[in-house]
Image (cartoon, rainbow, N blue to C red):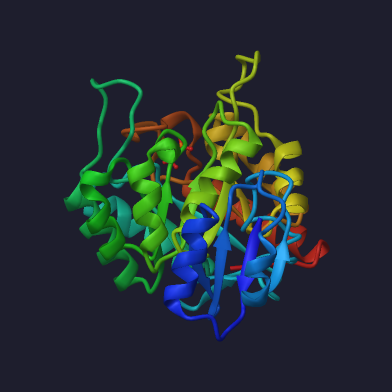
Amino acid sequence: MIIQLKNNVTTARATELATALQAIQVTQEGATLLVTPSAIKTINPAYEADVDKIFVMETDIQLAHPSFMSGKRSVQWGKNTIGGTSNNSVVIGGPCSVESREQIMQSAQLMQTLGISTLRGGCYKPRTSPYTFQGLGLEGLKLLAEAGQKYNLSVITEVKDSSHIEEVIEHTNIIQVGAKAMYDHSILKRCGTANKPVLLKRGFGTTLQEFVQAAEFILSGGNDQVILCERGIRTFETKTRFTLDLCGAAYLKHHTNLPVILDPSHAIGYAYGVPDLSRACIAMGIEGVLIEVHPNPKVAKSDASQQLNHQEFTDLFNSLNSVAKAVGRNLI
Ligand code: PEP
Ligand code: MN
């Protein structure tokens, strides 16, 4: 249940009510909200004088639920907005990993040439094997930030664990929480108090309910700038790396108030399928796509098979513009 308190309720009284109701206190757009477990459906009549509105919720998808707030929440970074009243869909492009100054500058230049707002590049890589490239860490993060500044782009990178979360918050415009890190509560908790947007990826074995509840940890910490990212789930199929769950995307689009973006690159795992899938994603009218692109994919230090080269990415971007136009979206 979400209880919106009247504006004249004192801080002390709000705290008293929160304790009595086992609720988390959240301030949002000037309003004080008490979010109780969803199993609580009624309140003691003695509290009614303090209450402005009550939203009785079916499950612990609460702050992200459209019955609490309809439409998509607006998420902003730099000069960019998705959700809210905008029809923007962001294309987040860039390499899997930041590998060198030259490489990330080439990627940044490509984004600028195409008029793309946001550059990605992993610096702390949550690899499946300890024997593969683990990312350049802080050195990579500084290169990414430098590329963003030089080419006037916003930047996003993934936080792998809480040991480097402060530097990621400091040097990026959007914090990415990856498929493997989305269960890390110290990361989710810190993201809840960060004043930057968070792109939360769905784990490959995560139900939609669990996924949105992970977002609830960030929202209930006070950060309402959350973007959900579906990036493929594990199914019986082995011909593709994962299976892009477009049904899940449709669910998230309809049943949450959070902007949704899709990541066809990690889903299929092979560059040949990324253009078709990206067009399908944009045609769904969601808030964006994340696409991996590398100046020379053959020598990429991670995810070599799925990264587009610059020409392929340019051709794809041009075709995405027509698809976006056809469904009333504007690419940023
Ligand atoms: C990534 O975006 O670089 C990444 C590692 O993705 P995921 O967390 O979806 O595997
Ligand atoms: Mn990758």
Q: Could you say where residue 212 lies in the image, as x and y percent from the top left?
A: 60, 45
Quadrant of the snapshot with the N terminus: bottom right
Q: Could you say where residue 119 lies in the image, as x and y percent from the top left?
A: 42, 59
- 137 vs 147: above or below: above
Quadrant of the snapshot with the C terminus: bottom right
Q: Does the rendering let one see residue 263?
A: no
Q: Nearer the viewer, residue 254 or 106?
A: 254
The structure residue drawn at horizontal position 42% and vertical position 32%, both measured from the top left corner, is: 303
Q: Could you say where residue 295 lies in the image, as x and y percent from the top left?
A: 39, 47
- Looking at the image, which residue sits at the far left? 139
Q: Could you say where residue 233 lies in the image, as x and y percent from the top left?
A: 60, 28
Q: Nearer the viewer, residue 161 or 323?
A: 161
Query: Which image quadrant is residue 127 in?
Result: top left
The structure residue drawn at horizontal position 68% and vertical position 71%, both measured from the top left corner, is: 48
Query: Which image quadrant is residue 74 in?
Result: bottom right
- Looking at the image, which residue sits at the far front? 46
- 96 vs 77: above or below: above
Q: Going by the image, does 176 lie left or right of 301?
A: right
